[in-house]
Image (cartoon, grey):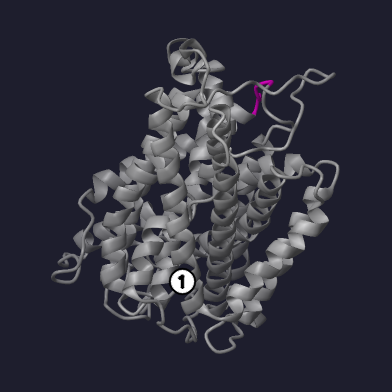
Amino acid sequence: MVTPPEPAPSGLKEVITTRQFTLMALGSSIGAGLLLSTGQALAVGGPAPVLIAFAVIGFAVWITMCNLGELSANFPVQGSFYEYSVRFISPSWGFAMGWNYVMNFVFVVPFEIIVMVMCARYWNPDVSAYLLVPIFICGLAVIYLFGARWYAEAENVFGVLKILVLAIFVATAFCILARIVPTDTRPAAELAYHSWRTKAFKNGIQGSFFVFMSAGMAYGGTEMLGLTAAECRFPRRVMEMASKLVACRIMLLYLLPVLTLGLVLKIDPLPANADGGAATKELISPFVLAVAQASIPVLPGLMNAIIVVAIFSMANASVFAASRALHAISSRGMGPSFCTFMYRDRPIGALAVVFAFSLLAFAKASKHGDEIFVWLLALASCSNYLTWSSICVAQIRCRLAHRRQAKAYGIRGAYQSPFGIGGSALAVIIFIFGLTAQIAAAAKSPLIMPPPPPAASGFIGLLVVAFFWGGYMVYKRDTTLFVPLRMIELGRKERMFANAESLPI
């Protein structure tokens, strides 16, 4: 087995405070997956499958964050979950996961910018993407001119706005259900919650499977708290706290809004076009649409403005995640050397690459710009499932290695996941099912889906991982699939493979 190169000094400074990290744990990574793609999921699968998928995937993501908190508390390292894949699974798999994560968020940045363009067209459907895209990219660049501390402050403000808009929607939804909204003159039979008896499940099993794509995208980025902790003053403490806060966030900011959205939003299928497919149109946030259906003045526009800011926040977080992950793997010699270049506490080389890829958002102005939304959604969802699965497998193998080497697990008093190995195995099963479901559903897309079906992009996500995984093994002549449990380094030190030279090939 080939010894993986040691990470160079990162140059990142611990400037993010506990207060900043706490608010980021509550509000960060809420973006287009929840605020926009849930409308498409409701149209394809119906309210019941959406709620079920979000609950099941949310539970598995909570287990994953508990695992990440456990690993971070006992083995604090730069690079977080990427390093755990290297350490507890294999260098080749860690290399593939590092690049999978980079590729994911590199493409999420233009995805979120495309979504902002869609939401901005709520006020003016004719506004050009050529005008809006540069504005959004410049806004992101300005934030990163001020470094990680100001990134965290911006995320705190954005996080409060996200919580505010979801709280406003839930309160408004309860008022609509109680029939105390004076502008909502619709007969009770026309309200969405009356259709639960007959339309709770749409398009059968295929429609129910499709919603796992939106769920996979909606929770994406939760694990980036592991990257943020590397620039926090108390990484062990904040990761333990984050693993607990995520449970509250899933319940209050995901499941409750999704439940009320399914009760008040009445979705009409997209009109069919001449060739029998679905006619594409600009997407509006389902939360805005639900309020607009109740004829409430001013509030839909206000909510849409806050949602644009919230999606900008997710693009901002995606730039952070992509640049830090690219810097981390490049510091190990597994990426371009110029991506390790630092200016003060800013990874300038990695940021340059991320902003270069953000220019893909100009594709929104092309003839098939709307289709790119669906493809990027499926690609990012696939990547998220693989990342979460890798974190859980790393935790399982970490605990098994301690048993195999007859060593006491963890540092005294350090956080440990309450779910153990059994919970991690269950989470992996859920993630594999979610990934399989979205690909199977997309292989024969319902008519109400915008063409083309995103099945191919799901396979592309798998192919990206296979390419880097296999490429590393061929280039390094290292065919090790799993580091033997007896050889995994369990010491409290940055050097990860003290006995790597003796590992069998």
Relative to the observer, which residue lies in front, 400 or 75?
75
Q: Which residues are magenta?
A: 443-447
In the rendered image, residue 444 lying in the magenta stretch gets the answer yes
Residue 253, how many percent across, how many down? 39, 45
Q: Main secondary structure of the magenta part?
A: loop
The kind of residue tagged 1 is Ala
Residue 16, how many percent across, how many down? 40, 77
Name the residue furthest bottom: 344
Residue drawn at point x = 64 percent, y = 75 percent: 142
Residue drawn at point x = 53 percent, y = 27 percent: 294
Residue 290, how many percent across, how many down? 54, 31
Residue drawn at point x = 82 percent, y = 51 percent: 128
The residue labelled by disc 1 is: 152
The image shows a total of numbered marks equal to: 1
| 232 on left or right of 337 | left
| 472 on left or right of 187 | right
